Image (tube, grey):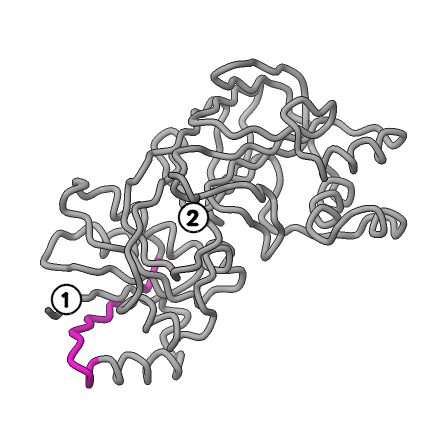
């Protein structure tokens, strides 16, 4: 049984010869693929939200294109949403990489057409959606320029996160974080709310996250005095809910209220909140992933 496939292609990647060849090959094999190319922000969401006889929607671009496609799908009633496939063509491709989706466009397209559909959660931040992660209080670009001695203490991923914390001239935001079983007040430079596991171009920020467990993973970093670096580094490796400087929770929802507007990066898209509720919307979309996808929970 043939499916009607719509491929939403980021205009910046429209000249990708490998993808063009792959699409032509799939069409020659009998697959009906309509390619729609974006030219400005909002196109991917608009294309994805248009109701029609589409069985499979493929996002071909980076994390921003994927985020727009997810917004478009969530604009459609659940029963009418097509399955979602991903061809990663962006710079970071954090979500696709975490899922184990091939970076080669031809292999990724084949997976979209032949892989298995899995019901996965979508994160919600007030009226915005995210599939991968919400980064709170610092930019999407994570750079690691920490003192060299920390490199030996931390694994590569933890080192990069600590580097981001230390290297930046971080603005400290005062406020409170509310979870189902606790409320924490104070100030801190960084928090990550993850549905996926990595952000910033390959840094594992919420390493225990799964896309089908009905939970969001929250990594919170408070002010770290210089004398407490070793303690904080240890906590970054242990990821306990009760860390003094770095804490990690798995929760169906979390609320953040700050005394001022705070920048938030949702899958690469910048927004601002002073009061926001993050929640996991379980099994919101059907995503095509490899059979060995690392982000799938064994017991959803």
Q: Quadrant of the N terminus?
A: bottom left
Return the residue at label 2: 296
Q: In this picture, which residue range is highlighted in magenta?
A: 27-40
Is residue 75 one of those drawn in magenta?
Answer: no
Choose between 120 and 46: the one closer to the eye: 120
Q: Quadrant of residue 128?
A: top left
Q: Residues within 10 Å of mark 1 (few under 14, many from 20)?
A: some
Q: Is residue 51 above or below residue 226?
A: below
- Whether residue 81 sits left or right of residue 279 in the image: it is left
Q: Is residue 1 above or below residue 77?
A: below
Return the residue at label 1: 3
Label placed on residue 181? none
Q: Can residue 43 be seen in the rendering of this structure?
A: no
Nearer mark to the viewer, of 1 and 2:
2
Residue under the image location 73 percent in, 27 percent down = 245
**What secondary structure is marked by label 1?**
loop
């Amino acid at each position: 049984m043939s499916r009607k496939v719509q491929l939403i292609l980021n205009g910046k990647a429209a000249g990708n010869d490998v993808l063009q060849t792959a699409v032509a090959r799939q069409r020659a094999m009998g697959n009906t693929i309509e390619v729609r190319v974006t030219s400005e922000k909002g196109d991917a969401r608009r294309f994805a939200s248009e109701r029609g006889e589409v069985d499979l929607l493929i996002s071909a671009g980076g994390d921003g294109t994927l985020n727009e496609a997810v917004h478009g799908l969530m604009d459609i009633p659940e029963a009418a949403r097509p399955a979602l496939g991903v061809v990663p063509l962006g710079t970071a491709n954090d979500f696709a990489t975490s899922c184990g989706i091939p970076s080669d466009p031809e292999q990724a397209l084949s997976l979209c057409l032949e892989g298995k559909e899995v019901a996965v959660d979508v994160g919600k931040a007030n009226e915005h959606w995210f599939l991968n992660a919400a980064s709170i209080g610092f930019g999407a670009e994570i750079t690691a320029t920490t003192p060299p001695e920390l490199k030996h203490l931390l694994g590569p991923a933890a080192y990069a996160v600590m580097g981001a914390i230390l290297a930046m001239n971080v603005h400290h935001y005062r406020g409170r974080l509310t979870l189902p079983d606790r409320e924490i007040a104070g100030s801190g430079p960084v928090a990550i709310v993850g549905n996926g596991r990595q952000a910033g171009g390959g840094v594992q920020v919420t390493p225990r996250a799964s896309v089908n467990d009905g939970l969001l993973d929250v990594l919170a970093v408070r002010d770290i005095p210089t004398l407490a670096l070793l303690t904080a580094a240890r906590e970054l490796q242990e990821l306990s809910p009760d860390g003094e400087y770095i804490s990690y929770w798995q929760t169906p929802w979390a609320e953040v209220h700050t005394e001022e507007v705070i920048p938030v990066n949702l899958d690469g898209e910048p927004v601002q909140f002073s009061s926001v509720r993050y929640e996991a919307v379980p099994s919101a979309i059907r995503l095509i992933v490899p059979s060995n996808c690392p982000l799938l929970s064994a017991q959803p």
